[in-house]
Image (cartoon, rainbow, N blue to C red):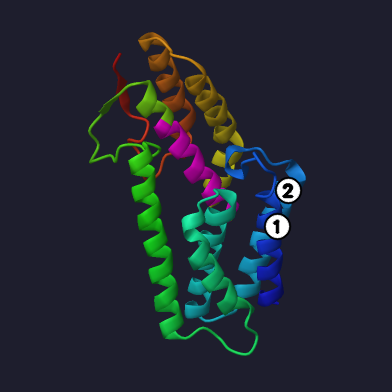
Amino acid sequence: MLAFAVVELHSALVAASSGGERHPAAGDCDADTVARVRGAVAEVTNAAAGFPRRDREVVDRWKHAAIMRYWHRRDVFAVAEEFGRRLLIDLDRRPTGEDLSDMRDEVEHAASVDLAALEATGDEPTPLTGTRRSTVGQTELVKRIRGDRRRIAAAALLGGSATQRVAHRRLVPWLVAAEAALADAPISREGLADIADQWRVWRAPFASELNDWADVTIVA
């Protein structure tokens, strides 16, 4: 039943995020915790499969808000997550068109505020335009690699396509290691260029949208 699946996913995400300095999106959770969250995501998806499109959209938007709030620890999604969860565990009524509109607004507002906060703190990569090769240094390179990892991890956690799941298994471990190396100490221009080259090779089999995400030229 959907309400029970929602409660279980919420509990699994809260447990994953309650480890003090542990950060789920950074790969700090043990395999059992990750498996529990993925299983709970699948249960919610399966429970909603036979529902009308409106209901399924509320479910999808709530899952996104919940994962952003707990897995990525973006508290700005708290209101959207709580609003969607209340809708989905209310067994006496189904979401109305107004409910769906409100849910869309809450999630989109949270995403807008979150992006602004990331840009203000320098934690979000510079937006890409077209297919122009971007010129980056070490700071921007680590932002891009971090952003790539977060997007792949979020997509895989939500089920994603077969390609996204394979990318999560194969590419994310390399991204985690590269991010750690870039954050550890200054690296020479040649070293940064080598990391960028490796990134393009690792990423090539999985590139879909953001094809130029790793298409960069290194500057000192």
Would residue 153 be found to the left or right of residue 187 on screen? Answer: right
In the rendered image, is residue 160 in sight?
Answer: no
Tell me residue 134's x, y (percent): 26, 29
Q: Amino acid at mark 1?
A: Ala
Q: Residues within 10 Å of mark 2 (few under 14, many from 20)?
A: some
Q: Which residue is mark 1?
A: 12
Taking the spot 37% from the left edge, 55% from the top edge, the residue there is 113
73 in the magenta segment: no
Whether residue 146 appears in magenta in the rendering, the answer is: yes
Location of residue 178 in the rendering, given as x and y in whole percent from the top left corner: 51, 24
Horizontally, residue 34 falls left or right of residue 216, namely right
Number of numbered markers: 2
Could you say which disc has been placed on residue 167 in the image?
none
Query: Which residues, given as a range, are shown in magenta?
Result: 143-158
In the image, is 163 to the left or to the right of 24?
left
Q: Residues within 10 Å of mark 1 (few under 14, many from 20)?
A: many
Q: Give the dominant element type of the magenta stretch: helix, strand or loop.
A: helix
